[in-house]
Amino acid sequence: MTVRPAGTTRPAGTVRPAGLRAGWLAGGVVAVLIALVAGLAFGSVSLPPAGVAIELLNLIPGVHLHSGLTEREVAILTELRLPRVVLGLLVGGLLALAGAAYQGVFRNPLADPHLLGVAAGAGLGVTAVISLRAGTSGDATANLPVGVPVAAFAGALLAVALTWLLGAAGGRDRSPATLILAGVAVSSFLAAGQTYLMQQHVDTLREVYSWLLGRLATAGWHDVLIVLPYAVVTAAIVLSQRRELDVLTVGDEEASSLGLHPQRSRYLLIVAASLGTAAAVSVSGLIGFVGIIVPHTMRLLAGPSYRSILPLSVLFGGAFLALADLLARTAGGQAEIPIGVVTAFFGAPFFIVVLRRSRGAGTP
């Protein structure tokens, strides 16, 4: 619990944000379970949801229940679909958590890993690694090395630093519009670097292009194991700073009066959010708008406190992307739709609504 130093008062008109409610937390867990069962049950081969749920319980040590599924169906569930759905939950949770953290740090309702250029920077790092693997046999994007997130992380940090510096090029005031324009400029610059690398290694052009559109199609347990440690570290750091984010929303002066170090907290959150974005991009490609759709929905439904927004973004972000992936692999018939196309289909109109709301609310 944050203790206010003697002699300080809360600024007039500010209200202490409410914490996370048990009902919303339970709703997030239910959403994850629904997305998990639906993602495992439906596809080119449909499985009974009840049998899928029972088979999931059988994964718990000591539990042995009869699910009614054949050995072939169990193999499809555990070896093909389960790692893909789990990866979708991890990536969706990371992107939504990063988006919420960026919005709190920059006090900008439009901040998002893609709009700030972070995803483009991470993508450039991964593209460089894929290009170096151009001479290897098979798909250059499959079974990427464990060190790929490191390259993505370096690119992500470079991008967010360039966006932050460019956003203040005309003065110290980094307004939402200026920051977004800076992010667009940085993204375009880094995209040019990606295009150059792709032209220099045309033999991997098709694989890189499909990766850039976002995909979980080649996901296996290898990809899950790569992203899991980064997801744990990112979630631990960002969630531990949820109270600090609430204080940062009222200004640096108020935060300092409460004993908080605003700049240190910002840098820590930026590094953690960039690490999560880089890990997600390294295994799934560029999947946009998750960092805008989910945090804003949670803010509208559960309130403005980051003590609610951050944990709920992890849960509902994972559920959202897992269901989007289900739509991507079933809506197109035999041809799978890139998951980035699905999220953009929902995210572009949502972004317009958020932009109109932020301007109508007088966001500077």
Image (tube, grey):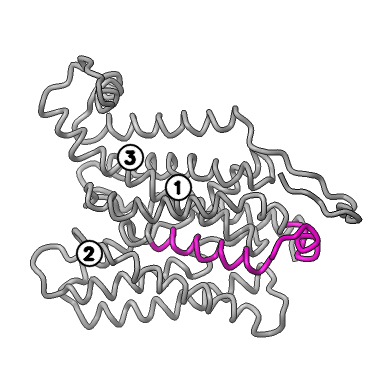
Residue drawn at x 26%, y 26% as measured from the top left: 61
Rendered view: 128 above or below 41: below
Rendered view: 266 above or below 165: above
Residue drawn at x 14%, y 33% as measured from the top left: 75
Residue drawn at x 58%, y 32% as measured from the top left: 24
Return the mark for residue 326: 3
Rendered view: 74 above or below 329: above
Query: Please, what is the dominant secondary structure of the magenta stretch?
Result: helix
- The residue that label 1 is drawn on is 93
Return the mark for residue 302: none
- Of badges 2 and 3, nearer the viewer stands 2
The three-letter amino acid code for the residue at tag 3 is Leu
- Of badges 1 and 2, nearer the viewer stands 2
The three-letter amino acid code for the residue at tag 2 is Pro
Q: Nearer the viewer, residue 352 or 223?
A: 223
- The residue that label 2 is drawn on is 145
Q: Position of residue 321 (x, y in %)?
A: 40, 45
Rendered view: 150 above or below 59: below
User: How many tags in the picture?
Assistant: 3
Q: Nearer the viewer, residue 154 or 302?
A: 154
Q: Marks 1 and 3, Cα distance to the nearest angstrom?
A: 16 Å
Looking at the rendered image, the quarter that the C terminus falls into is bottom right
Q: Position of residue 198 (x, y in %)?
A: 26, 77
The magenta span reads 249-278
Extreme residue in the left direction: 137
Q: Position of residue 308 (x, y in %)?
A: 62, 41
- Of badges 1 and 3, nearer the viewer stands 1
